[in-house]
Structure formats: structure tokens, C-alpha cells
Amino acid sequence: MSQEAILKLLDANKQWVEDELSHNPEFFKELAEGQQPEYLWIGCSDSRVPADRITGTKPGQIFVHRNIANLVIHTDLNMLSVLEYAVAYLKVKHIIVCGHYGCGGIRAAISRNNYELLNKWLRNIKDIYIKNQDELNGISDTRARENALVELSIKQQIENLMKTSVVQRAWHLGEDLTLHGMVYDVANGRLKQLIQYDRNSPLPEIYRYYFDED
């Protein structure tokens, strides 16, 4: 088996280390002392959407969780663990849910193709489609319909974040935490904010939790 592809990565890593040390000899020593990121990024696993590159952030500045189609699902213990650690312990100030146009997960969810295990994940996107089917069915262009669903899904994930006890507790404790729904256009590299929520944003009472301090 050829190791050329892996050796290429290892060589690139060595070059990166040398470049960083040439700018700051203490770079890795400082990183090793801990992290205090200001942002939690919940993004798509798509290889074309690297959180640090498109935001210009450096190591230690952005805490990242990625999954197919950047979903916030209330039964996903992986995502919830990342969320709680970022909010309760790292004290991030901003949570960004970032989707992107041309998302393969969105495209797969719109189709009726059987993706076996992946069906269970994509079901969450199909539910968003049904919730907004009048609007989406009125869009004749397939690509435009996919992009509209990308944006609707991002907004839904922000609402899902608001419904978590993790976010609500932070707001209850007076934490300065803001939620941002953003979309990335792979075709031009631009980020656009679609929605922003904070502790004063409306949420139906049925989703609001009581806390011990109440």
C-alpha cells in the first residue's frame, strides 16, 4: 500500500510547525497552556468548509463540532456534550451554526434515494422540508429549492439550540451568549448571517425550563 498520501500530510505538518515557530517561537508552548475560544462552531463535515480557514481564526480561538448537514439534534449526545463543554466550561460567547449552499446532506434528504443508515440522520432534514413544504414546493428551480432548504434548516438548528437546557441555563445565569445562524457560499467563499438570537429572543413557554434558582 502506498504511503505517499500520508507522507504528504506529515511533510506539510512539519512545514506548518516551522512556519509558526518562525513567526512566534513560543506558539506551541502558549497553546499547550490551555484554550479560551470565543466561538463554538457547529458546521457541516463537508471538506470544503473548514471553520478556521473561512473565518480567519487561529488555533485556540474557535471550538468546532461538525456533522453531516450541521444538525442540532436533541438526542445527539456527541453534539450535546460539545455544547455543554463549550458553554458551561469554556464560556464561549458565540455559537455559530453554519450551513452551506450545495450541501450533499440537504440534496440527499430532498431525494427519495435509500441511504440505509444515513436515512435516520437525513430524516431530520426531511421533517424540516415538510414543515415548510408550501414555501419549498413553490420553488421550481431544483438548486434554488435546495439552497432555500439549507437556509431553513440553519434557522431550525438555531431554534433547536434555544430549546436546550444548556443554552437556557447560560442565559438564566446571565451569561453573554449569542446564537448565530450563518450560511457559507462555496462558490465565492462568503459567509452570510441569516439569524441571530439572544436571551431576549422569544421561545414558546413549553420549551422553557425551570432551574434550581427559580
Image (cartoon, rainbow, N blue to C red):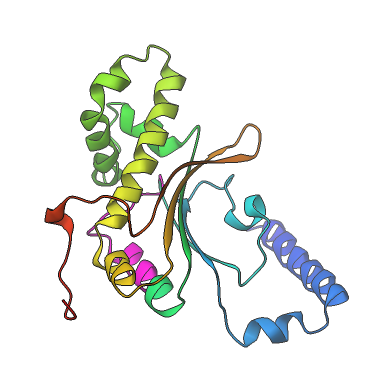
Left or right of 165 in this view: 105? right
Check the image and report above or below for 69 versus 2.
above
Residue 82 lies within the magenta run = yes
User: In the displayed structure, does residue 128 sit left or right of residue 17?
Assistant: left
The quarter of the picture where the C terminus appears is: bottom left
Against 26, is 205 above or below? above
- Toward the right, the furthest residue is 22
* The magenta segment: 69-84
Q: Where is 138 relative to 159, above or below?
A: above
Residue 93, given in percent of the width and then of the height, sits at 48, 66
| Relative depth, front residue between 33 and 93 | 93
State which quadrant residue 131 falls in.
top left
Residue drawn 29% across the image and 41% down it: 122
Position of 56 compared to 183: left or right? right
Q: Where is residue 43 drawn, in percent x and y?
A: 47, 52
- In the shown orientation, is residue 194 left or right of residue 81? right
Could you say which quadrant of the image residue 164 lies in?
bottom left
Q: Residue at x 45, y 21 (%)?
A: 144
In this view, the residue in front, 37 or 146, is 37
Number of marks in the rendered image: 0
Which quadrant is the N terminus positioned in? bottom right
Q: In front: 87, or 126?
A: 87
List x then y, in percent, for residue 66.
45, 56
Q: Quadrant of residue 133?
A: top left
Residue 22 percent coordinates (x, y)? 88, 75
Residue depicted at x 40% and y 44%: 69
- Between 60 and 47, the one lying in front of the other is 60
Residue 11 lies in the magenta stretch = no
As drawn, the residue found furthest toward the left would be 206
